[in-house]
Amino acid sequence: MENVADYKEIVDVIKANGGEAFKRCFQCGLCDVVCPWNRVRDFSMRKIVRQAAFGMTEIESEDIWRCTTCGRCPQQCPRDVQQIASVVALRRIATEYGVFPTPVKPVRTASASLVGEGNPLSEERAKRADWSEGLSVKKFAEGTEVLYFPGCYLCYDPRMKKVARATADILKKAEVDFGILGVEENCCGESIRKTGDEELFKRLAKENIKTFIDNGVKKILVSSPHCYHTFKNEYPEFMANFEVVHISQYLFELIDEGRLELTGEYGRKVTYHDPCYLGRHNGVYDEPREVLKKIPGLDLHEMPDSREDSLCCGGGGGRIWMETPKGERFSDLRLDQAMGIGAEVLVTACPYCITNFEDSRLTLEDEKGSEVLEVKDITEVIQEVI
């Protein structure tokens, strides 16, 4: 295939994947105005959409892989162009032909790991429940109230395992009847779908759905907004409907019902970051803030670009697996905003956000030679005060 993809194929793929709306674009440029990439380099979603309209998209270009699917451009678009659907459709063409620019090649490694081990981190499936050692977390069985689905990063990443353990500790303190499926779980598949590998997503989704049904799962509690989004909004495409709750929502429920008592003081200045897939994509803004407001002594302040205008961490759309050069990381900008309001702790509720913020924090501390601020998941803060 040539550098410039065939016009008919681009149009056919975009049509087949609900992206025909790109024809409605009248090049107003609002997508470029709000895109976080334009804070760190020149980038034009408008140009990609325009090229796609004329079948002139260069599938070997890194540009079609830059989109983090953060949702800012569809939020602002006056013509419902559905930029995310269009760019994912273009990635499907690239994936079909095996066209991966050098910075994107880690996606292939993630894909192979998902096929072989059910996770994108090249970790063994047999170790998926190792994070729970010593916590007496039971295997989910039919009749259990809640399935806790930690997600891949919380099962394997050393930093994120702390979040899974904090969550389990909270659930046990609140006497929640919960269990995990461990080795029976697959990755939810949300991120690999956004990189264009639709077939692999379908395989992961169908295997998970079968596992959930076979085990009698009705209610799923998740830590990742990406799991939340795909279980809630994408798995119904396969005629599978489960009650899906994000941990920030569940914490609010537990505290509001008096099942979880906050007794400790948290005398810190805190700011909260809205993950794209929890906030913009699913409208969950209030519950995490209300949880933080209920913590004794916690001093909550808002950053610039909060709630619907939240600045993406840079990890969505499969970017979490790709290398982003220093100077182009949105997470660096976000830490600057948090420190700019004098926050001592940056709290969020997404493993991708925490991973990117921790990388930025360590880089910044190396440069400054001192600690700049802490990065915490909301469950880690709650664990400290129960």
Image (spheres, helix red, strand yellow):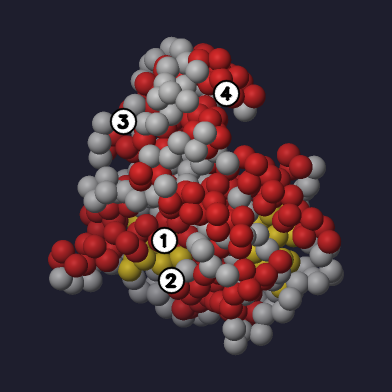
Q: Position of residue 18 (x, y in %)?
A: 62, 25
Of residues 186 and 147, which is closer to you in this image? 186
- At a point 43% along the width and 29% down the height, the residue shown is 59
Mark 1 or mark 3: whose residue is earlier in sequence: 3
Residue 272 drawn at (x, y percent): 41, 57
The residue shown at (42%, 56%) is 353
**CA–CA distance between discs 4 and 1?**
33 Å
Q: Amino acid at mark 3?
A: Phe
* Pointer 1 or 2: first along the chain: 2
Is disc 3 placed on a helix, strand or loop? loop
Q: Nearer the viewer, mark 4 or mark 3?
A: 4
Q: Where is residue 43? Give x, y as percent.
A: 31, 30
Q: Residue at x 23, y 71 (%)?
A: 371
Q: Which residue is mark 2?
A: 159
Q: CA distance from mark 4 to mark 3?
A: 21 Å
What type is the residue that disc 2 sits on? Answer: Arg
- Find out whether the residues at labels 4 and 2 contact each other: C-beta distance under 8 Å: no
Residue for badge 3: 43
* Measured Cα–Cα span from mark 2 to mark 3: 32 Å
Residue count near mark 2 (Cα–Cα under 10 Å), binned few <14, some 14–19, many ≥20: some
